[in-house]
Image (cartoon, grey):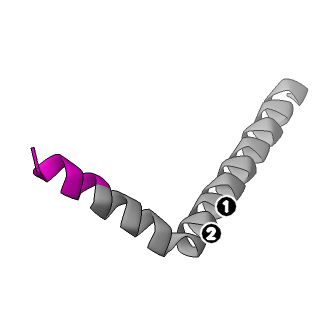
Amino acid sequence: MKRFINMKSKAGMEMVQVGILIAIAIAIGLIFKTQITDFVNGTFAGLSSF
């Protein structure tokens, strides 16, 4: 029984870590939105010129 509770606790911690990483990725995306958009547009413009 203790193993099951311990495994459930670890799974919960992993979900919290994944949630935090997703939140950080979204925040970085929102902060650097214009730079990311300019980079992607420039990359596709360069590719379409071939």
What amino acid is labelled 1 in the image?
A: Ile
| Disc 2, SS | helix
Residue contact between numbered discs 1 and 2, judged by CB atoms under 8 Å: yes
Mark 1 vs mark 2, CA separation in Å = 5 Å
Q: Is residue 44 magenta?
A: yes
Farthest residue to the right: give it: 2
Q: Is residue 36 magenta?
A: no
- Name the residue tied to disc 1: 24
Residue located at (39% from left, 60% from top)? 39
Q: Horizontal and vertical percent for residue 34?
A: 46, 74
Q: In front: 49, or 37?
A: 49
In the rendered structure, the answer to whether residue 48 lies left or right of residue 33 reads left
Up the image or down, 9 lies above or below 27; here it is above
Q: Main secondary structure of the magenta part?
A: helix
Up the image or down, 29 lies above or below 10; here it is below
Residue located at (54% from left, 66% from top)? 29
Within 10 Å of disc 1 (Cα), the crowding (few <14, some 14-19, many 20+) is few
Residue located at (20% from left, 58% from top)? 45
* Residues in magenta, as a range: 43-50
Within 10 Å of disc 2 (Cα), the crowding (few <14, some 14-19, many 20+) is few
In the rendered structure, the answer to whether residue 25 lies left or right of residue 14 reads left
Q: Quadrant of residue 26?
A: bottom right
In the rendered structure, the answer to whether residue 45 lies left or right of residue 40 reads left
| Disc 1, SS | helix
**Which quadrant does the N terminus fall into?**
top right
Q: Horizontal and vertical percent for residue 40?
A: 34, 58
Q: Horizontal and vertical percent for residue 32?
A: 55, 69
Up the image or down, 43 lies above or below 29; here it is above
- Name the residue tied to disc 2: 27
Q: Quadrant of residue 2?
A: top right
Up the image or down, 29 lies above or below 5; here it is below
What amino acid is labelled 2 in the image?
A: Ala
